[in-house]
Image (cartoon, grey):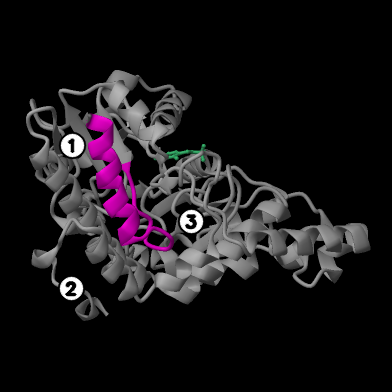
Amino acid sequence: MAGKFFPMSQFENTLNYAQQMDEQDPLKEFRGKFYFPDFHEKTVRYFTGNSLGLQPKTTVKYIAEELEAWAKFGVEGHFLAKRPWFSYHENLTEMAANVVGALPIEVVITHSLTTNLHLLMVSFYRPSGKRTKILCEAKAFPSDQYALESQVKFHGLDLSEHLVEVAPREGEQLIREEDILAKIEELGDELALVMIGGVNYYTGQLFDMKTITEAGHKVGAIVGFDLAHAAGNINLKLHDWGVDFAAWCGYKYLNSSPGGVSGMFVHERHAFSPELPRFAGWWGYDKDKRFQMEPGFIPMRGAEGWQLSNAPILGMAAHLASLEIFAEAGMERIGEKRDLMTAYLEFVIEDISNKNADRCTFELITPRDKTKRGAQLSIMAKGQGKALFDALSDLGVVADWREPNVVRVAPAPLYNSFEDCYWFGQLLEQAIQ
Ligand SMILES: *Cc1c(COP(=O)(O)O)cnc(C)c1O
């Protein structure tokens, strides 16, 4: 597929070129499957699919079907609805597993992301003897930081000693993978858990999850990832990489409604371990005997055994609508377009930066190597502050600002176009003026 595109060395920062790229894009019809925000006098250029993905046009139909089933059947919808609510999540499992490179038994869609991280750490962070420490990345997403801190404290352990962070070196923005690997080795048999964001939310840096997992396992630790910024963005192979557990949210690249449902991955090797400690609820109970309501928890096999509650069907319906689009497009093609379009946006920004070097320069924090990033580019605007971002917003660009001077933009392969990237450059240039 990639061969159908122009080679990158020929990128041009012109409308005509961007439109030709769109013309040749194998995923071009997918843009029409989404609603684009329209709250502005100017056309909105949406680059925050990494924060809240756009709404598929099919979402309303899937939700309406469940509202109708509720109206028609009341409680009997659990069994009589076209997709019975009792087992609704099963409609999502296989497609979600394909998105993250997992076996169906390893995946369940349930709860929300931070909840799932806690539930997984209850099972997989079990400090004992010497092996008590967690390794994470410095400046992790705040919710992950709080989750990790509270897990350490929950076990009555001292935070400063047990939560070990790997930070970028002095004067650098990115974390060197070699530093993560060295820290894993150094901690050795004191390391209980490695828990890292697969793609860093701030810099867009993608970590080599396979290598980190192998290094963690080599010293006897458990390895888990937060994939909030990776699911639906990166070509993941969680099963093959041997990752122990992971969780992600459905509402960023996965376009499954604000605060929508989350995914959980538990590797097959833990799938048949009823003895793993866990916080249990009835929806994780052996399905055939769930309604016998007997005391004594018997978990379902696989990731489903971590479910607590009966599923929020409307949120699950939104996720189903989106996963069907991912299944149709395929992560393979999504990944090819992601690399090309992100490279094009990078080229456009660089061109604008060079042309306006007297006023301002843009430094890319995100790795330039496409194997070390996904769709997100984090740009540091040197010589400019929030006024630049406000001007950009006034021109119709929806992006994301982080103090002191970082703009995050993510062209989402399913619905962004090369023309969007071209216009981003034009509007950025206007905003500088
Ligand atoms: C978006 C995001 C979250 C959000 O968690 P919720 O429980 O869905 O609010 C957590 N962690 C990371 C790394 C994120 O990017």
Nearer to us in this view, 68 or 242? 68
Residue nearer the viewer, 348 or 50: 348
184 left or right of 137?
A: left
**Viewer-nearest of discs 1 and 2:** 2
Task: Check disc 1: other Cα within 10 Å, few if <14, some if 14-19, many if 20+.
Answer: some
Taking the image as drawn, is residue 21 in sight?
yes
Marker disc for residue 254: 3
Q: Residue at x 18, y 73 (%)?
A: 6
* Residue type indicated by callout 1: Leu
Contact, CB < 8 Å: mark 1 with mark 3?
no
Q: Which residues are magenta?
A: 409-432
Residue at figure coordinates x 13%, y 37% from the top left: 186
Q: Earlier in the sequence, mark 3 or mark 2?
A: 2
Q: Earlier in the sequence, mark 1 or mark 2?
A: 2
* Dominant SS in magenta: helix
Q: Amino acid at mark 3?
A: Leu
From this view, report whether residue 89 is shown above or below residue 219: below
| Whether residue 432 is situated above or below residue 15 in the rendered picture | above
Residue 168 drawn in magenta? no
